[in-house]
C-alpha cells in the first residue's frame, strides 16, 4: 500500500463501492442492519500522502456510494468528515504525540479503538442525517451501535485478510 498512486486509489474506490453496493447492501443482518466496509479506504489510507488528494478521494468514495444509493451526499459528507478528522481520531485513540503515524507501532487495542471510533463517527453522521427525528433519537442510536459493531467485524476481517496492521 505504500507505493499506491491516484490511479490505484481510484481502482480501490471502484472496487470498494462495487463491493458495498452489490454485495454488502444485499445483506441485511437481522432484517435491517447493513454492514459498511467502504470507510476502510479512509481509515487505512497512508498518513504521509497528500492530504488534499486524500480528502478529494474520500469525497469521491462517498459520492460514488451516494450515487448508487440515492442518498444525496450523506455518505460523501460522513466519509469526508471522518477523513478530515482522521489524524485527530488516531492521536486520541493511540495517545501519541509524534507526527509520525504507523499502524505497525501501535498495539492491537489501540488499533481496534481507532477503527471502532472511526466507524462509529461515520455511522452516527450517516444515520442521524438520514433518519433524524427527535422522537426516534434512541432508536437511531441503537441502530448506529449495532451497525457499527457489525461493520467493525467486517472491517477487522478486511484488516486481517490484507494484513493492514503490518503494511500501512
Image (cartoon, rainbow, N blue to C red):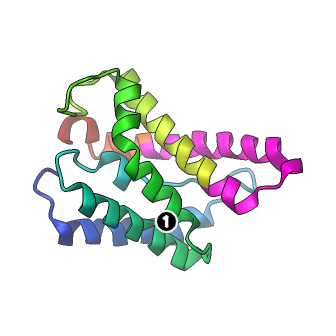
Residue furthest right as drawn? 135
Relative to residue 150, is residue 24 depicted above or below? below
Does the segment drawn in magenta span residue 88?
no
Specify the principal SS of the magenta part. helix
Q: Position of residue 161 (x, y in %)?
A: 32, 45
Relative to residue 156, is residue 125 depicted above or below? below
Does the segment drawn in magenta span residue 143?
yes
Q: Is residue 161 left or right of residue 153?
A: left
Q: Is residue 61 left or right of residue 76?
A: left
Front-most of residues 17 and 119: 119
Seen at 44% across and 72% down, the residue is 18
Can residue 34 be seen?
A: no
Relative to residue 4, is residue 47 depicted above or below? above
Seen at 41% across and 44% down, the residue is 85
Residue furthest left as drawn? 3
Q: Is residue 120 left or right of residue 140?
A: left
Seen at 46% across and 66% down, the residue is 62
Seen at 42% across and 33% down, the residue is 114
Residue linked to disc 1: 76
Q: Is residue 147 left or right of residue 134?
A: left
Q: Position of residue 23 (x, y in %)?
A: 52, 66
Relative to residue 32, is residue 65 depicted above or below? below
Front-most of residues 120 and 18: 120
Q: Examine the image and state in which quarter residue 139 appears.
A: top right
Q: Position of residue 78 (x, y in %)?
A: 52, 57
Label 1 crowding class (10 Å Cα cut-off): few <14, some 14-19, many 20+? many
Front-most of residues 48 and 165: 48
- Looking at the rendered image, the quarter that the C terminus falls into is top left
Instruction: Determine the secondary structure under disc 1.
Output: helix
Q: Which residues are magenta?
A: 126-155
Can residue 17 be seen?
A: yes
Q: Position of residue 73 (x, y in %)?
A: 55, 71
Amino acid at each position: 500500500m505504500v507505493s499506491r498512486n491516484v490511479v490505484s486509489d481510484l481502482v480501490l474506490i471502484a472496487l470498494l463501492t462495487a463491493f458495498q453496493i452489490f454485495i454488502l447492501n444485499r445483506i441485511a443482518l437481522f432484517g435491517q442492519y447493513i454492514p459498511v466496509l467502504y470507510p476502510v479506504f479512509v481509515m487505512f489510507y497512508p498518513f504521509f500522502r497528500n492530504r488534499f488528494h486524500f480528502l478529494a478521494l474520500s469525497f469521491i468514495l462517498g459520492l460514488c456510494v451516494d450515487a448508487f444509493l440515492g442518498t444525496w451526499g450523506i455518505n460523501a459528507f460522513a466519509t469526508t468528515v471522518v477523513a478530515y478528522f482522521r489524524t485527530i481520531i488516531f492521536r486520541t485513540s493511540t495517545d501519541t504525540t509524534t507526527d509520525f503515524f504507523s499502524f505497525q507501532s501501535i498495539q492491537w487495542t489501540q488499533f481496534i479503538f481507532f477503527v471502532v471510533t472511526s466507524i462509529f463517527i461515520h455511522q452516527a453522521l450517516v444515520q442521524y442525517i438520514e433518519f433524524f427525528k427527535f422522537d426516534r433519537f434512541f432508536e437511531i442510536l441503537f441502530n448506529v451501535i449495532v451497525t457499527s459493531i457489525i461493520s467493525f467485524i467486517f472491517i477487522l476481517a478486511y484488516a486481517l485478510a490484507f494484513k493492514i496492521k503490518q503494511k500501512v
